[in-house]
Amino acid sequence: MKKWIVLLLVLLLAACGEEDSSAGAGEMPQEVKVEFNTEETADPGEEVLLSATITQGTEAVEDADEVVFEVWQSGARENSEMLEATHTQDGIYEHSWTVEEEGLYFIQAHTTARRMHVMPKMELTAGDPDPESIVPDDSEDSDAMEKMGH
C-alpha cells in the first residue's frame, strides 16, 4: 500500500511540475515598417520635405519614440546631419531640409517605435552629378548609432 501512495505522490508532483508550454508564447508583435514619402530627385538649393510613414500592421504609428533623418552626401557620412522629425498626422513624420549642392545624398530614417528600431535608407539625387563623384555607401550603421548617442 505504501508503494501505491508513494507512486501516487510522485505522479502528482510530476504533474504539478509541468510547465504550460504556451506560457509566454503569445503572438509576436508585428514589425514596425517605415516607408519614405520623399521624392528621389531635387535641385540644388531646393527645400526638400523629408517624410516617412510609420506603420505596424495596418495601424499608423502615432507614438514613435524617436524618428531622426540622417542625411549625408555620397562619400561623406562622417559629415552627416541628424534631423529630428516631427509627427504630423496618420503616422507621418517630417522635417524640411535644403539640398546645398549637386550630388547623390543618402537619407536614413532612424526610427524607434514600440520597442523596435528600424533604419531604412533611400537615395536622393540633386541636380545632375558627375557619376565619377559618386561613392557607393559602404558605411557602417553602427557609426550612426554612436552619433545618435545609442
Image (cartoon, rainbow, N blue to C red):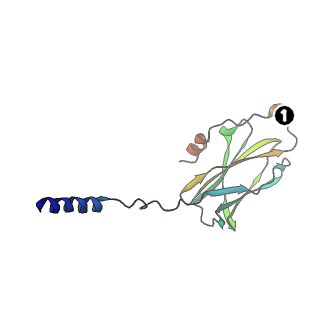
Q: Secondary structure at mark 1?
A: helix
Pick the front one: 34 or 104? 34
Q: Amino acid at mark 1?
A: Pro
Instruction: Locate residue 129 relative to residue 1 in the image: left or right.
Output: right
Pick the front one: 116 or 125? 116
Queried whether the magenta region covers residue 33, the answer comes back as no
**Magenta segment, which residues?**
26-30
Identity of the residue furthest to the bottom in this view: 89
Instruction: Locate residue 37 relative to residue 82 in the image: left or right.
Output: right
Tell me the quadrant of the picture where the N terminus can be found. bottom left
The image shows residue 100 at horizontal and vertical percentages of: 79, 46
Pick the front one: 113 or 15? 15
Identity of the residue furthest to the top in this view: 132
The image shows residue 109 at horizontal and vertical percentages of: 67, 52
Pick the front one: 12 or 45? 12
The image shows residue 17 at horizontal and vertical percentages of: 29, 59
- For residue 67, what is the image quadrant? bottom right
What's the residue at 81%, 33% (across, down)? 133
Residue beneath disc 1: 131
- For residue 7, what is the image quadrant? bottom left
The image shows residue 138 at horizontal and vertical percentages of: 68, 35
Is 109 placed above or below 94 here? above
Is 66 placed above or below 137 here? below
What's the residue at 64%, 63% (across, down)? 57
What's the residue at 38%, 61% (across, down)? 20
